[in-house]
Amino acid sequence: MLALRRLPRFTPRLAGVRGNATLEAASQPKADTPPPAPRSSVTAQSSAAKDKQAQDAPEDANATANANADGQQPPNGGKARNPKPQPEGAREWCRPIAKGVEPAYDYALRYILKDAKFIQRELKALQEAIAAEEAKAEGTRDEGALQGMRERAHILTVQGEINLPDVRWKARNGLVDMNRAVHRHLVEQRWREEGDLDLLMERIYQMKVVPDMLPELHPSLDLRIKYAEPPPKSNYLRTRVKRKLKTVEPGIFLAPEQTRRLPEISTTVFHTERRLYTLLMVDLDVPDPENQSFTTYLHWLQPNISLSAFISSPHILNSHTRYVPPHPQRGTPYHRYVLLLLPQASPTKPIEIPVFEDSARVGFNYRAFAEQYGFDAAQGGGAHMWRETWDETVSHIYEHTLKQEEPKYRRMPRPDPYADLKRSKKYL
């Protein structure tokens, strides 16, 4: 068995080895050097004078002196190869290398700035043309051409800044300003192309949410939810440990105890104007014994939620059809729970939806509901889903929240092909 020994805090043989040295260099004994000679008062005075002269000398002289001492000339006239390191937690982009170290990098930056200035001049001319067209009388405007110029101006606004290093750096490090069109474009591009949307759509289609519930789905916003962490296995810790909220990955299994409280919902929307959405949560796998099939159950409904690019954590009330915790029945397979955030037919006019009574939650027909109130998941919105199976928490939900007897299900017994033979006498 390998035995480990802690080194002493101050190891003499490693004192003179650099942090990036090899193990061979660290293992070699350091040559004994004679102790420095005692400094006299004259030597101390001359050393102080030399230090003062060195401080007053320019940086180029110091670089030349260092180059002469090492026998090599530093590149770029004695300038440091790397710029001053950025402090931790900085909020601005800094160059990875100093100016003049890599000519190709400097040329690329100049080319990007030149291209950005060219596009900005084109954008300014287009904005003047838009202003001139809007100044015309109401009946003399060319609305088609005006709309085309506005779309072209939006594209130029993004193209004029999208290649700037500081814009890219801020978008990558979460320092975006959603007031800027280029930042909204980069955030949406990252969501669509770097796996988050692909994972969601993969789970939606794998778990047959499309077509079991939705005929079609094309998300236009990033919907994220958080539930409490899984409970500890120890009963002693369950009442003594405060569990944190954890982001839910689409399609994973959650315990019913995690979803007893309302989830924390956050969104990333890419339009600047306020639009109204409706939130609904549906269980797709509620057993239907009468028809020997499965039906749906509406867990939560909240219409008229206002969203825009500047609202990342909307305040969603529980004032319409109240939230009922997921309660997968005992003896059933896993249940699929779908959370939808759908755009309303009118983005500014609230809609009136009656509150669903508890008895009307079972058998919720989403397609008829969407047709009645004008919802279409193919036109945008957000979606999320996860799965759950029965555990002891469901019994508490039936007793204290639903206040009804808990149903129990099991699979139908298979017919015994030898039943008649077993009832007959084996020997005459």
Image: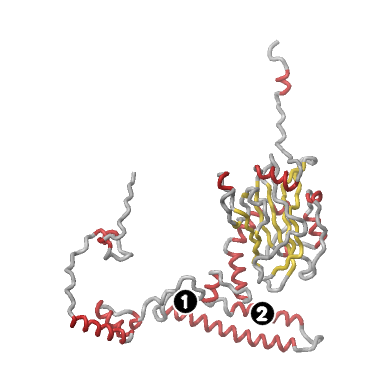
Q: Nearer the viewer, mark 2 or mark 1?
A: 1
Q: Residues within 10 Å of mark 2 (few under 14, many from 20)?
A: some
Sequence-wise first label, 2 or 1: 1
- Residue shown at the point (48%, 80%) measured from the top left: 109
Quadrant of the snapshot with the C terminus = top right
Residue 393, x across and y down, in percent: 66, 45
Q: Say which residue appears at 82% left-offset and 86% top-offset.
A: 139
Q: Amino acid at mark 1?
A: Cys
Residue identified by numbered label 2: 152
Q: How is the image coloured?
A: secondary structure
Picture quarter containing residue 382? bottom right
Which residue does the image show at 18% across and 72% down from the upper left? 36
How far from the left and from the top, in percent, is residue 189?
Answer: 60, 68
Q: Look at the picture and state if 121 lies above or below 244.
A: below
Which one is in front, 323 or 225? 323
Q: Say what amino acid the circle numbered 2 marks.
A: Arg
How far is disc 2 from disc 1 in space, using C-alphas? 32 Å
Residue denoted by label 1: 94
Above or below residue 279? Residue 188 is: below
Q: Along the line of sight, which residue is nearer the eye, 11 or 104?
A: 11
Q: Is residue 40 left or right of residue 276?
A: left
Residue 2 at x, y percent in the picture: 33, 46
Disc 2 vs disc 1: Cβ atoms closer than 8 Å? no
